[in-house]
Image (spheres, grey):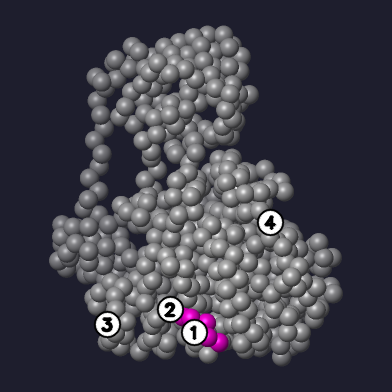
Amino acid sequence: MFSKILIANRGEIACRVISTARKMGIKTVAIFSEADKFSKHVQLADEAIYIGQSQSNMSYLNSDAIINAVKKSKSEAIHPGYGFLSENADFVEALNELGIQFIGPSKEAISIMGDKIESKKLADKAKVSTVPGFIGEVKDVKHAQEIAESIGYPVMIKASAGGGGKGMRVAKSSSEVKENLERARSEAQSSFGDDRIFIEKLIEQPRHIEIQILADNFGNIIHLGERECSIQRRHQKVIEEAPSPFLDESLRESMGSKAKDLARAVNYTSAGTVEFIVDNHKNFYFLEMNTRLQVEHPVTELITGVDIVEQMIRVAFGEKMKLTQDNVTFSGSAIECRAYAEDPLRGFVPSIGRLIKYQEPKKSNQIRVDSGVLEGAEISRFYDPMIAKVISFGESREIAIELMSDALDSFIIRGIRNNIGFMRDILSKESFKEGNYSTDFISNTWPDGYANNTDDEKLKNLAISIGAYVQCKFRERGRENHSKNMVCFLNKNQEKISYKFFKDTCNISIDNHSYQVISEWIPGQILFECSINGEPFSAQVDLLDEGHRIILKGIEYNLFFRSQIVSDLTKFMPRKEEPDLSKYLISPMPGLLLRIDVKEGDAVRTGDSLVVIDAMKMENILIADKDCIVKSILKQENQPLMTDDVIIEFD
């Protein structure tokens, strides 16, 4: 076996590979950029080598620097993880010439299957059905519009070398093709160094289902079942599960067989994933093949017991797979939630900053956490916004959902905004619980943008009960036996409550409903574990200036408690007027101001593009929300931005 491997990646996937390598007795070498010099993967590896500045093209995409690190460390092989150079055939060829083993497929397989245009051509030859579209490179806007008209709207504009939702845009009209083509090209060039684009028909309300493949150098090819990846936002997966609640055994076998046919047609080796979209009638179409380890591979590992990274390393070393299709067994259900540094309440804009508090859910044989951060770490604008992945495993899908819900309730992240509450909210929706969803789930559930609220009266009362307990403990320290009448302010509503507190028990009355909260919570703790009327709950508590924020089942409640007399006097207090910010274009995120689409004095109309901001490898277009005149432009192109920076002032 290899004695030392270098991991050409960062973050959680670098830590994941280190874990398996250590189990196999293999020493590991980490690489790191300026931004990552104190990162978790650097601390976990046996050695670490600096490879360049924070920008990806100067570090993790710099093949020369990485190859120099391989030589310096005398590593025998490289594991690329996902992203960066994991699907770069030129990088693999350079390694081959130096006699360094690439832990992945051949450069020929990467070249063909990593190219969305060429892979569709191969799928046609292998008699694997593909999405209707133009199998070739789009030349210009006119060509793109002609293709879209011939296919019929809506269409999907896609980067040939794309992945992870980057370089993808939906167009429902000729004008949208013109508008989105250059956005897709620019994003593709930025992310992959390849701006080639193709167009295919948009299959509406599809399921996104993928098949995990393993193949060795002796012609053995197996599949490890499917993963359902339909919970997506902007074509970026958020929650995945295995097995899919939509597939039956016949469809599973048919899709698995076609995936193996495709792998065989390209002489595939190592781990790979064949992605399909499936319509409501269970017709499936080849989408693409990812010639690398997938972000969501843990759900497959949990239901099969197969360590996919270990299999990749063994195949790369030249071993014959001991696994056969007949001895692959499936059991239970697994769900993965991706924790991202983004703000769901502000349109999912990226959030950067320091993790001032970071506490993962308790790990067990039913809860796995793959992360690449530590408390105190900095979330940088230079890389993907993923913080960690939480994976649950249960005997049934219902148990896996329940375990995941509990895990998210206890996942504490402070210092940056994140999507934990958003994912918790998804898990609570009946359509998700029933497995009745498509890739349109998020846009259909929140058509006007995500809102962290609910009309559930019982949940609101439970949150107020927890808040009352916290108020008792926090404000009435040292008084173990007392009672009080109070008014709870929640948004613009008021609730009259009363409570009796003795030691760790608080009996609360809210609108003629009684709640008994029992907890050993201590002021200062964020995690609040308790029982309410005998039922266990986990919530999170944050101290506000004049109250508390209670996060329960992903929903945030800002609670303020007052005595009755103070409440009566509150209405006489003057209110501070909110400043008028409508005259300004304010950056909703940190990032790089790529382009300014207007000039001072321009008259702009509602919906016109104003600026493009690059943040965490995605291009974000800010548009005018009303007709106005550009008075002054306060920033310049290629200038870094922070959240709430003023970019443009309007008349």
Q: Looking at the image, tell me whether mark 4 or mark 3 is earlier in sequence order.
A: 3
Q: Nearer the viewer, mark 2 or mark 4?
A: 4
SS category of the residue bearing label 4? loop
> Residue 191, percent across and down?
48, 74
Given the image, on which type of amino acid does mark 3 rest? Glu
Q: Residue at x 39, y 64 (%)?
A: 205
Q: CA distance from mark 1 to mark 2?
A: 9 Å
Q: Nearer the viewer, mark 4 or mark 3?
A: 4
Label pair 2/4, CB-CB below 8 angstroms = no
The residue at which mark 4 appears reads as 331
Q: Position of residue 628 (x, y in %)?
A: 15, 60
Which is nearer the eye, 221 or 162?
A: 221
Estimate the spatial distance between the alpha carbons at disc 4 and disc 1, rounded to whole Å: 33 Å
Separation of marks 3 and 1 at Cα, in angstroms: 21 Å
Give me the disc on residue 83. Answer: none
Give the structural element (helix, strand or loop) at label 1: helix
Residue 130 location (% of width, % of height): 46, 80
Q: Earlier in the sequence, mark 1 or mark 2?
A: 1
Q: Which residues are magenta?
A: 126-131
Mark 3: secondary structure: helix
- Mark 1 — residue? 120
Q: Quadrant of residue 608?
A: bottom left
Residue of label 3 = 149
